[in-house]
Amino acid sequence: MNVSNYGKLVSAVFITFSGNCRKALTYYHTCFGGTLQFETFEKELQGYTEMPVVSGALVSDRVLIYGSDLVHNEGRTLGNYMSIFLLCENTDDRQALIEQLKPNKKDLFAGYYDDQKLVEITDAFDVRWVLGV
């Protein structure tokens, strides 16, 4: 995965998706734009319904997300110890991201989060996001 053409990168996140990496990164692409790259196995692996993504990357102006379908030997566990932090330009920018990332759209209220410095949401892939202004 070569991302050297994208300028100076200061941080990135790596997420193990355990079977839905392509779907997750493609979804994040609709939220953040940018470029998607995938490296997959050349043959099927037992336990996977699709060709597993060995390494995938979403490179955008806002975020660099690496991911994989391959999990550690102990498996994938969800926890609240890690969130992805994004600093938004303003409350309108943040509200637009909330609307894109939040899986349950009917829970959204425009302007509801305007007076909060940090807003935490969990997307459809159980990834926690902290959006600041």
Image: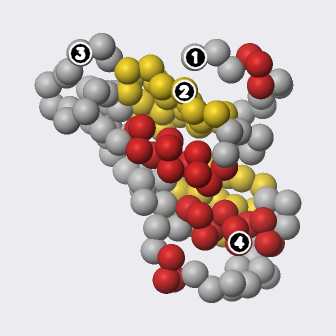
The crowd level at tag 3 (other Cα within 10 Å; few <14, some 14-19, many 20+) is few
Which element carries disc 2, helix, strand or loop? Answer: strand
Q: Which of 129 and 32 is in front in this view?
A: 32
The structure residue drawn at horizontal position 61% and vertical position 70%, both measured from the top left corner, is 99
Which element carries disc 4, helix, strand or loop? Answer: helix
Asked whether the beta carbons under mark 2 and mark 1 sit within 8 Å of each other, the answer is yes
State how far apart marks 4 and 3 are (Cα): 42 Å
Dot placed on the residue nearer the N-terminal end, 4 or 1? 1
Question: What kind of residue is marked 1?
Answer: Met
Residue topped by disc 4: 95
Q: Which of marks 1 and 3 is in front?
A: 3
The structure residue drawn at horizontal position 45% and vertical position 46%, both measured from the top left corner, is 24
Q: Nearer the viewer, residue 6 or 90?
A: 6
Q: Residue 1 carries which label?
A: 1
Relative to 33, say whether 87 is above or below.
Answer: below
Residue topped by disc 3: 43
43 sits left or right of 131 in the view:
left
Question: What kind of residue is marked 4?
Answer: Gln
State how far apart marks 4 and 1 are (Cα): 32 Å
Could you say where residue 42 lies in the image, as x and y percent from the top left? 30, 13
The structure residue drawn at horizontal position 74% and vertical position 16%, both measured from the top left corner, is 4
Residue topped by disc 2: 37
Residue 74 appears in view: no
Asked whether the beta carbons under mark 1 and mark 3 sit within 8 Å of each other, the answer is no
